[in-house]
Image (cartoon, rainbow, N blue to C red):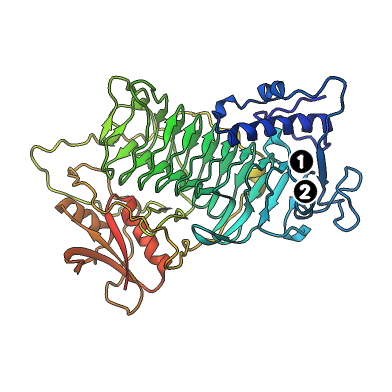
């Protein structure tokens, strides 16, 4: 009998093995206990969990099991047994009670097979697919509208629940602004899954949610792999993030623990803003198109201290390993491996910094344009991946004396060094598809959290050899008044900031707002278009604000 193990990546078995799946479920149950008791998640390993919860000698393990098979099951005549499974996960959840384990057979679970979206998990119920392959052949595909208590209406595939667990499935939501899993003010376990092809985020954690998210794969999601905001405190451990906008976006007053993850080939690896205070330990952040770690506004990521070194590895990120130019705080980053000269801003590395020699850049994909509006407040940064334009005009600033120039990034025309990457599940090839470019998340007025983001960013002197602005210059946008709508303005405090702004929006005009002069970069009838402009300004380190006319 093959022993199932949550971190394993062995080939998928199409035959359910009851004793094996039960051991996995026992492990998940213990992991849930650890999460609900707020114990350190590093205690979560499959063998140790089984050791803590062994079945009684000679006794048959007792558990409430329900079986689902989208091909052979029947919601009408089935009773959820292995001989008469249900057809839909929706029906199994209707019948489940606390402590139930729902076993999913290989297949696609979608509206076409009878699922009703969003699929709402139940407290204390475990959804079990095939953890060994991260749900290679067990695909939950679709989405439906959910009215969030913190962020209005969203389109989500699965809604989390207190004390629930999700393991061994592939989740994809191809709908407009589609989220895979939405976790709001709940504690649960999300382990050994694949989140791929979601048009917005793989997972969104909001409210005061504190889930354990471990050993999952996030790839080719439209906006972010995971977005963490509000006062959420999840533990994000040993996951892989590839080819998305931000690998992990952390905002507002959240304080997640980010440990042992591999984050590569994204627009930016980890982006922290608002007043968020994440803890980063032992992550590998490499080969991202722009920056490895970005800290902005009043955020204070803990990237390592004198007593607790970070142990993070940064390398081959195209612009900066760590970029804190838009942060108002000095960021602590003791005990990490950083490439010399590849960090910018207020950074305290103490004596624990271990520099790596510069190495060739990683060729990152640039053929897909990805709109990236993190599901946060109106002043939250957003990003979009765009194809670099040839011959576009660079921002120029006069050389100044007494200004320390940042060393220019080395340019390599040779193929990049081979970097080991997380194993890409075969589901990637079958699920990857061309997706239409989608508009940004529309948030209705009055539903955003009341806390204001920091408006007064520090004065930043940008020397003449600083990197060009992110993305292509935006197309001309009329700055004339258009009646009721929204406008985006930027508080410009230095000549360098104004030149950067002119590069992005050549026809920006000076206007008065709140008894001070600002630069108006656009007036919009549609809020989502205004938020897209707001994101572009914020992602370039400019102090942008959205105003309703």
Task: Identify the residue at the far bottom of this view.
Answer: 483
| Residue 119, image x, y percentages | 68, 54
Q: Quadrant of the C terminus?
A: bottom left
The answer to whether residue 513 is above or below residue 413 is below
Relative horizontal placement of residue 453, taking residue 39 as reference (left or right): left
- Of callouts 1 and 2, which one flags the residue occurring earlier in the amino acid sequence? 2
Q: Residues within 10 Å of mark 1 (few under 14, many from 20)?
A: many
| Residue 358 appears in the rendering | no
Secondary structure under tag 2 reads loop
Relative horizontal placement of residue 56, taking residue 46 as reference (left or right): right
Relative horizontal placement of residue 341, taking residue 287 as reference (left or right): left
The residue to which callout 2 is attached is: 96
Residue drawn at (76%, 23%), measured in percent from left and top? 54
The disc placed on residue 158 is none
Where is residue 306, by image quadrant? Answer: top left
Q: Residues within 10 Å of mark 2 (few under 14, many from 20)?
A: many
| Residue 287, image x, y percentages | 44, 36
Task: Identify the residue at the far front of this view.
Answer: 37
The residue to which callout 1 is attached is: 101
Task: Identify the residue at the far left of this view.
Answer: 401
């Amino acid at each position: 009998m093959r022993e199932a193990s949550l971190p394993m990546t062995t080939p998928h078995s199409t035959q359910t093995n009851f004793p094996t799946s039960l051991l996995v479920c026992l492990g998940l149950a213990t992991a849930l206990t650890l999460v609900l008791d707020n114990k350190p998640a590093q205690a979560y390993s499959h063998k140790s969990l089984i050791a803590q919860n062994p079945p009684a000698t000679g006794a048959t393990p007792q558990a409430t099991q329900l079986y689902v098979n989208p091909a052979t099951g029947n919601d009408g005549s089935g009773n959820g047994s292995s001989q008469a499974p249900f057809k839909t996960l929706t029906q199994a959840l209707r019948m489940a009670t606390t402590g139930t384990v729902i076993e999913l057979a290989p297949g696609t679970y979608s509206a076409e097979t009878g699922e009703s979206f969003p699929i709402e998990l139940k407290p204390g119920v475990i959804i079990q697919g095939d953890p060994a392959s991260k749900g290679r052949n067990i695909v939950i595909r679709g989405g439906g509208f959910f009215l969030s208590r913190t962020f209005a209406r969203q389109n989500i595939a699965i809604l989390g629940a207190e004390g629930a667990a999700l393991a061994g499935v592939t989740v994809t939501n191809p709908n407009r602004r589609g989220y895979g899993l939405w976790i709001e003010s709940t504690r649960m376990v999300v382990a050994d899954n694949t989140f791929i092809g979601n048009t917005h985020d793989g997972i969104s954690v909001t409210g005061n949610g504190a889930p354990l998210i471990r050993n999952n794969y996030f790839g080719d999601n439209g906006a972010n792999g995971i977005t963490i905001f509000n006062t959420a405190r999840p533990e994000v451990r040993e996951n892989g993030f590839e080819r998305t906008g931000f690998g992990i976006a952390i905002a507002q007053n959240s304080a997640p623990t980010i440990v042992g993850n591999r984050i590569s080939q994204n627009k930016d690896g980890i982006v922290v803003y608002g007043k968020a205070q994440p803890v980063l330990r032992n992550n590998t952040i490499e080969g991202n198109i722009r920056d490895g770690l970005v800290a902005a506004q009043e955020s204070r990521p803990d990237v390592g201290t004198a007593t607790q070194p970070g142990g993070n590895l940064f390398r081959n990120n195209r612009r900066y390993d760590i970029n804190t130019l838009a942060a108002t705080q000095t960021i602590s980053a003791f005990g990490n491996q950083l490439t010399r000269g590849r960090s910018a801003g207020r950074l305290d590395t103490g004596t624990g910094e271990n520099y790596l020699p510069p190495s060739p850049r990683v060729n990152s994909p640039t053929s897909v344009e990805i709109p990236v509006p993190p599901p946060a407040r109106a002043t939250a940064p957003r990003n979009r991946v765009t194809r670099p334009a040839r011959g576009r005009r660079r921002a120029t600033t006069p050389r100044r004396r007494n200004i320390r120039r940042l060393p220019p990034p080395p340019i390599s025309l040779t193929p990049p060094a081979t970097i080991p990457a997380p194993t890409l599940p075969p589901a990637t090839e079958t699920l990857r598809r061309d997706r239409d470019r989608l508009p940004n998340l529309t948030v209705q007025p009055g539903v955003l959290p009341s806390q204001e983001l920091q408006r007064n960013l520090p004065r930043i002197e940008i020397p003449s050899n600083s990197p060009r602005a992110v993305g292509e210059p935006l197309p001309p946008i009329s700055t004339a008044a258009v009646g009721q709508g929204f406008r985006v303005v930027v508080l410009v405090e230095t000549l360098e900031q104004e030149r950067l702004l002119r590069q992005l929006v050549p026809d920006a005009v000076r206007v008065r707002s709140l008894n001070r002069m600002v630069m108006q970069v656009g007036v919009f009838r549609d809020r989502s278009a205004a938020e897209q402009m707001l994101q572009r300004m914020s992602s370039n380190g400019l102090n942008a604000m959205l105003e309703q006319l």
